[in-house]
Image: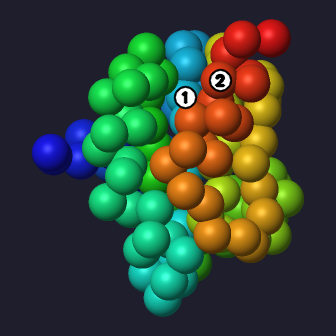
Amino acid sequence: MKNNMKKFEDFGQSDYKEVTKEGKYILFFYADWCPDCKFIEPKLPELEQEYSDFEWISFNRDNNMDTARELGIMGIPSFVIIENGQEIGRLVNKDRKTKEEVETFVNSVINK
């Protein structure tokens, strides 16, 4: 299954707020050196398909430190849900995440 997730750099924009001001987004923060990020990576295409009403954007935290700081991303992998420019949920910590944990998180936000 192919990963359709866009990288933040694909938008040619330096401000995530401009990119996410309209619509529904799930931001995925990772780093190339992070073993827990590599653990969830193979499941991302399935999650993208399952939650296809969201646009998924990946942020390499090391290349986007200003955005990570602004959003308070202290651990990776992390997920932030934004709808029409407003953060509506976050799963931000340094723990390894399973597909099921990400599903539980997304469902808890969208089923409020």
Which part of the image, by quadrant, shows the N terminus?
Answer: top left
* Residue 40 in the image, given as x and y percentages of width and height: 46, 62
Q: Amino acid at mark 1?
A: Tyr
Decide which of 39, 74 is in the foreground and name it: 39
Q: Is residue 68 above or below residue 14?
A: below
Residue in the image at 74% along x and 24% along y: 108
Left of 75 or right of it: where is 33?
Answer: left
Q: Front-most of 76 and 73?
A: 76
* Residue drawn at 61 percent across, 60 percent down: 97
- Determine the residue located farthest toward the front in the rendered image: 100
Q: Which residue is mark 2?
A: 107
Depth order, front residue of 10/76: 76
User: Where's residue 94, x and y in %?
Assistant: 74, 72
Q: Is residue 15 left or right of residue 60?
A: right
Q: Secondary structure at mark 2?
A: helix
Which callout, 2 or 1, points to the residue nearer the camera?
Answer: 2
Question: Which residue lies under the disc numbered 1?
Answer: 25
Q: Is residue 77 visible?
A: yes
Disc 1 is placed on an element classified as: strand
Task: Please tell me in which quadrant of the rendered image residue 45 appears.
Answer: top left
Badge 2 density bin: few <14, some 14–19, many ≥20, Cα 10 Å: few
Q: Position of residue 28 (x, y in %)?
A: 54, 51
Give the x, y percent position of residue 6: 33, 45
